[in-house]
Image (spheres, rainbow, N blue to C red):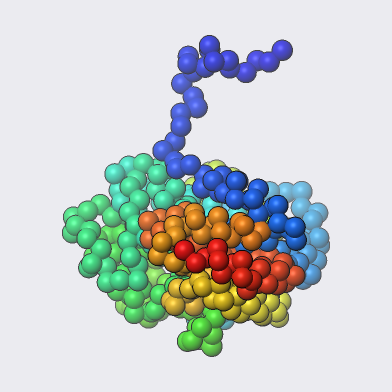
Amino acid sequence: MTTSATPETSSRHHLPRRLALPDFPWDSLTPYRERAAQHPDGVVDLAVGTPVDPTPEIARNALFSAANAPGYPTAVGAPVVRAAITEWMERRRGVAGLGDDEVIPTIGSKESVALLPLHLGVHPGDLVLHPRAAYPTYDVGARLVGATPVPVDTDADPATWGIAEDAPVAVVWLNSPGNPDGHVLSVEQMARIVAWARARGAVVISDECYAELGWEAPWDTQPIPSLLDPRVGGAEGRSGLLALYSLSKQSNLAGYRAAFLAGDARLVGAVTEVRKHTGMLMPTPVQAALVAALGDEAHMEVQKEVYRERREVLVEATAAAGLVNDPASVAGLYLWLRGPATMSAYELVGAFAELGIVVAPGDFYGEAGAGRVRMSLTDTDERVAAAAARLRSPEAAALFAG
């Protein structure tokens, strides 16, 4: 006999109360996935962006070696973890001099995106600004604390954002390289945004998890700049600034949930305090894997070349079908494609599904995504080649003719 609430009794319960969250966007792809699965040569899933290539052996070995871990890990991570993070940030991101109190490991970066407004004390009524074409979790994190998410054009001068001088801006989110659009923010643009935010007492947080995936000049040969680059913060240094990074993409560790945040010690301390109270602890074996992966650049370069080759194949094939990648999409894990002006994002998704290919509609990422789709680089070489062959076909040309 069940003891769960029945329709007759559930009205007497106060909980659960539905939070002010949007519908989970991926659920709307179900009919398109079903249609794509009917393709005689099988589906090619280029929607979600989950890594499919093997986890590096160096990380797997480190995880196994640390598997005998009966005690609780610390919220701040082992000293060797913090040292690995600070060394990597200097070596790969040009951010020198980070102290132990300026870094902390996190259980993936999505939890930080969703929960940092809570951890930092953002209040109901505060404004949380985020890129106008954006991963939905920036919006969700604001809603969870009763704040108001506001999309803005982070490529533009913040003076054009239309935010009143006295508006209660608490957080400005940046995402460079951007998901879904692959845009990269220059040092000068980030410095402009930081100055604008500091004048209003707002914190700036940058999600930089695709920073090792630069494809077009100048980012094919130069490091993509971090928010914590000393040229960005100027005389005030890292004050009011946080950067997030994840090993999910560069090291195929999405299943490990291995990431970190770095920046202003005062902000990191506030986050750490909440994490201690709530038991948000990166497991000891994962900490070991993170250290091993950060210390080995060879596997990262191999994976980058895999993505580079897949990207070149897909850029050529989508162009052959009449689709146009955003010219400013120069980095990251996705193509940001537009079709004929007469086709909506979901019509484009439907056309791809007829070819057995699943992509994400731009509408998932805000109004700026209208008429676009996001295509990931994360299926196997064989499946990417299959998608490319289908996109070069006369059928594809007809489907995308508008």
User: Above or below — where is 340 with respect to 93?
Assistant: above
161 lies left or right of 390:
left
Q: Residue 31 vs residue 363: left or right? A: right
Of 69 and 115, nearer the camera is: 115
* Residue 130 pos. (x, y %): 38, 59
What residue is drawn where x is 39% and y is 79%? Answer: 186
Using the rendered view, name the quadrant where residue 173 is placed.
bottom left
The quadrant of the rendering that contains the N terminus is top right
User: In the depicted view, which residue is nearer to us: 324 or 6?
Assistant: 324
Which quadrant of the view contains residue 88? bottom right
Q: Residue at x 41, y 51 (%)?
A: 139
Position of residue 255 in the picture relative to residue 25 (left or right): right
Residue at screen point 48% across, 14% down: 12
Residue under the image location 41 percent in, 38 percent down: 20
Q: Position of residue 37 (x, y in %)?
A: 69, 52
Name above or below for residue 376 compared with residue 230: above
Q: Position of residue 244 (x, y in %)?
A: 50, 64
List x then y, in percent, for residue 328: 43, 76
Front residue of 365/266: it is 365
Q: Most extreme residue toward the left, as rendered?
A: 165
Can I make out residue 344 in this image?
A: yes
